[in-house]
Amino acid sequence: MHLFVDISSHGFGHFAITAPVLNAVAEMCPDLRLTVRSGLPPDKLRQRIVPTFTHIAASSDFGYVMHDALHIDLATTAVAYRAAHAEWPARVAAEAAFLADFQPDVVLSNVSYLPLAGAARAGIPALAICSLNWAELFAHFFGHEDWAPPIHAQMLAAYRAAQQFIRITPAMAMADLANTTTVGPVASLGRRHDLGLNGDKAVLIALGGIAHHLPVDHWPRLPGVRWLVAGHWHCTHPDAIAYEDFGLSFTDLLCSVDAIVTKPGYGTFTEAACNGTPILYQRREDWPEQDCLIDWLQRHGHCREIGGADLETGAVAAPLAELWRQAPPCPPSADGARMAADLIHRTLAAHPVPATAG
């Protein structure tokens, strides 16, 4: 069985969702042939995807052009979408020919709509999986523009062409799609390690896969707290440590710290909640997906919101103390990967492609 998977490289969240699902599919289908197209680095992909796969280093979508992890460049994004759809029928035809050459049994997309449109044109069964879709976000940001309706219609047609859109919990409403199937939360589960900090608390600062640098160098010292930051920040704070120095996977590191400072994002929110790690989060500027994520986290996770001004100045002592005083909830079950994998496996089994002679 051959599964062709397209993973958006708009941050790491799409990958964080897809990897545990693919691992579960591979357990159900030991002879799985897996092809992964993504603009993410292959070493990053292999950190989480267990089965062997062929990597195609390319991106079929861009999602949104970002100033940083919290702010969208709407003007540049609008230009990019208009360019992407200027020759849409030709792009779909080229994608269909590309996919037909691979002869996959099923196409899975998180959450580019071009491979879904191409698969429909080529007669290949396709599934989508995500907590959001670009059409719903496009309508939010650009629905009022006179040039937007034809593009939005093409996006919706592509998503609707999928046999199922696997809507993972938590997720946006997706009211414009009648082909959604809802499954539980998807999250990797890790193992707690002793970080060797002699009783100091460890706070991981990780705002996802899109560059965003907090001025930790200038934060005041907080006795008994160590800041774990990205090595490429070259942070000079006396209590900062490059988190890469621990040699742990992100999920194991997340399990081993006392809190994480982050932004609303599916992968980090669900992994922190399901692994029982407290979260201090800063809202994103006008990002409609965050409402469902925050609502879910407040019900199932150990969390507190913090303002951007406090993160700029390092006024985090009181928010962290309040966070640590909260009674930890019972972590939710990360059963969505297995549920999604079962849907994908059933689709694979129902649509085998005959082997080509020669």
Image (spheres, rainbow, N blue to C red):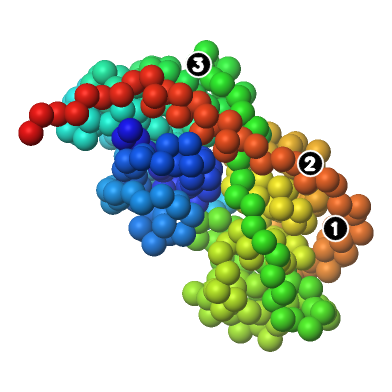
CA distance for labels 3 and 2: 27 Å
Q: Nearer the viewer, residue 212 or 108?
A: 108
Name the residue located 76 percent from the left edge and 53 percent from the top edge: 276
Residue 190 screen position, x and y as percent: 64, 57
Q: Which mark is residue 179?
A: 3
Q: Nearer the viewer, residue 332 or 40?
A: 332
Where 121 sits versus 292, above or below?
above
Q: Quadrant of the N terminus?
A: top left
Q: Amino acid at mark 1?
A: Leu
Where 63 sits versus 150, above or below?
below
> Label 1 belongs to which residue?
323
Mark 2: which secondary structure?
helix
Q: Nearer the viewer, residue 322 or 107?
A: 107
Q: Which mark is residue 300?
A: 2
Q: Amino acid at mark 2?
A: His
Name the residue located 19 percent from the left edge and 28 percent from the top edge: 355
User: Which of pointers 3 and 2 lies earlier in the amino acid sequence?
Assistant: 3
At label 1, counting other C-alpha atoms closer than 10 Å, the crowd grade (few under 14, some 14-19, many 20 or more) is some
Asked whether the viewer can see residue 53, the reply is: yes
- Horizontal side of 90 relative to 323 (left or right) equals left
